[in-house]
Amino acid sequence: MLSFILRRLGTMALTMLCLTLVVFFLINLDPNLKKLAISQTEMHTSAEQLESWLVNHGYRQNFFSRYGQWLGIVPKQPVTDPATGKPARRFSFCNDPVEPTFSGVLQGDFGCSTKFKTTVASKLFPALGATGILMFWVLVVMVPISLLIGILAGMREGSRTDRTLSVASIASTATPEYVSGVIFTVIFASWLGLLNGSAASASRGITFYNFTLPVMTLAIYGIGYIARMTRASMVEVMTQQYIRTARLKGLSFGSVVVKHALRNALIAPFTVIMLQFPWLLTGVVIVEVMFRYQGFGYTLVEAAGNNDIDLLLGCSLVSVFIVLITQLISDVGYAFLNPRIRVQ
Amino acid sequence: MQLEYIGAFDVVLGVLARFWPVWIALVVVMGASFAYKKRLGLYGQLFDSSVGIVGVGICLFWLFTAIFASTISPFNPLVQIPIMKDALPGAVEPQSGLVYLFGGDKLARDVFSRMVYGSQIVLIIAPAATGFALMVGITLGLPAGYYGGRIDTVLSFLANLVLAFPVILLFYLLVTPGIMETPIPYAMAGLFFLFPIIFFSVLFWTRYKKRPDRLYILLGLTLIIGGWVYAGLVFDADPFRIIHIDPNQLNIFVAVVFASSPGVFRIVRGLVMDIKTRDYVAAAQTRGESPWYIMLWEILPNARGPLIVDACLRIGYTTILLGTLGYFGLGLAPESPDWGTAIKDASRLLRSFIHPALPPTIALMSFVLGLNLLADSLREQSMKD
């Protein structure tokens, strides 16, 4: 088991290395660097000035050496101030080193955000915290509801409850966040006036009034999918021999479901819920932009829109990490929950 | 100047009347399918359940809407008529006397016409991109599942690499105006669009190797048609100027294919690993058939059920992806009538006007719902066999 986890962690590290290299390559394409230079200098700068800005800020160094600097395996070089000729900080608003030092992601330095004029760490981690709160409430709403729907539908396959709930869950998987968000806002904010159509105030304090719509919007897309997986798993369990034995023994239907079926039927949904995180990540971006909630997704969109290189790299590192770690947890947890599976 | 309005009941009637070509086509196709459902195989079986009928109905509805878009929509989706700015549903346009059935948006365009034309964009890109993703996924998934070993390790690692990307980040990196200046989209298009040609060439080669009369015709057709489409799509050098794709649409297309082919790859790989243990595969191996013959003519036909279901779901998912792209303003032109862009524009103004937001949302939702219902009943029918 331990060697399995270690092997998986090794693959994970390799995957992250490859992915960050790809991201690094894509955001350092020449047109993207030009865009960055234009947004960072004043209006109407000539092509030479843009070029010299890029050179002065170290963007014209060798690609691999810059990737190494970001990673922390090549010492980060200070730039030379053209006026004085002395080494200077790349950006005045971050504590970039003045001497060559190893200062990259491996050392815990995520770099400098050109859009927010601060270090990446001081922007990214509060945003992650805010998204964590959103995710927590989404899971609190989504998991019990979807499991309940799945179990009720799968309990008696083909019954009217099953058909109704199945169609309802198909409908929910057909409703992406930007659709349900608009519809919920129209109903609950514009017509009924019960809830706030913007979650911008939620950064200062979460209330039922400003936080329900984002949570609801985010949860509804996942509910259908998890419910369908739970239903499939429940249907399969209900056809097993031991369920029939329990019924023939004279146990009531309810107690068969609760005592015998439920625990076995919940193994598969666990994996599904863990693998749902990558989907939630996309949803988070949409919902945070739609409801103006200052979290991870909002930061990612701002970073991508302004070609904020270090911040975008930080965002991709975090999101890739989340995807891979949830995959690992789902594999390990599956083996742990299901005694029939043994990992070599 | 005061606008004249027609009542809610007249709006509903007007909308139903505008869709007249769709209703006729629907009645003809659904009636014919229903009458001959015994002879139509899997498609005919769909008409045995109400879920299947609803699914087919919704999908055909949007298909015919896309085909007859120019007849259905009363206005040009891009033309702005200033007096109709933010007009409420049912407003009469004074010049032509035609009605803005679902009102006008903030740029004074007809919401109804935009919704109808939006279906064209979705119904061209989503199925085509899914088709290419299927080709790529199948061509790579078959050897990975069949041979296993190193080729499987490498391909699976690459697939997991793409799958580990959050979709939205992938699109922000791949669908930007900047990347159009680099050769990356064209290189990717060149790579992906090769797969169908390879697939069909190998398909015919393995089957008709011993029958040159058939082989040369089929191979020649594949190479001519494939090469023609390839030249048109990748190099925009179609000699007859029929096949043409905008650079930014090509970019979206490539990004969507790139994002969804690893999913197909994984499914195909899993199916192949299951099917290759069957007796008929062992029989073919004993007969001395070549590995690619076994993969393409023994394994693939037996994996078609789950693949068809997956393709339906995937078209729906691609539609959602296209909407996401539109919602973030990536790739598509800002005035493009696609549903995602329309939802983005309307959702910014929900506080003042809600009517431009509802038609595109409901359109997108109903189309994806139709595809999902279709996939669900296909799955149910193929399980009965």
Image (cartoon, rainbow, N blue to C red):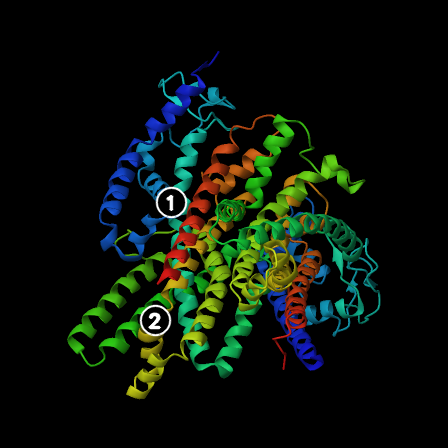
- B318 and B217: which one is in front? B318
Q: Looking at the picture, how far across and down is residue A263, in whole percent?
A: 65, 62
Looking at the rendered image, the disc whose residue lies closer to the viewer, 2 or 1, is 1
Determine the chain carrying the residue at label 2.
Answer: B
- B172 and A333: which one is in front? A333
Name the residue rendered at 71%, 43% in the picture: A293
Type of amino acid under label 2: Ile
Residues marked 2 and 1, same chain: yes
Q: Earlier in the sequence, mark 2 or mark 1?
A: 1
Residue at numbered disc 2: B198
Residue at numbered disc 1: B50
- Whether pointer 2 and pointer 1 mark residues with C-beta atoms closer than 8 Å, the reply is no
Looking at the figure, which quarter contains the C terminus of chain B?
Answer: bottom left
Residue B275 vertical placement versus B365 (above, below) = below
Say left or right for A117 vs A242: right
Residue A185: image quadrant is top right
Name the residue rendered at 28%, 43% in the picture: B30
Say left or right for A10 vs A171: right
Q: Looking at the picture, how far across and down is residue B320, in whole percent?
A: 50, 48
> Which element type, helix, strand or loop, lies under badge 1?
helix
Q: Looking at the picture, how far across and down is residue B302, in whole percent?
A: 35, 70
Distance from the alpha carbon under mark 2 to that under mark 1: 40 Å
Type of amino acid under label 1: Ser
Determine the chain carrying the residue at label 1.
Answer: B
> Which element type, helix, strand or loop, lies under badge 2?
helix
Q: Label 2: few (<14), some or many (≥20) within 10 Å?
A: some
Say left or right for B169 vs A293: left
Q: Looking at the picture, how far across and down is residue A330, in whole percent?
A: 64, 66
Residue B250 in sight here? no
Residue A7 vertical placement versus B113 (above, below) = below
Say left or right for A155 vs B221: right
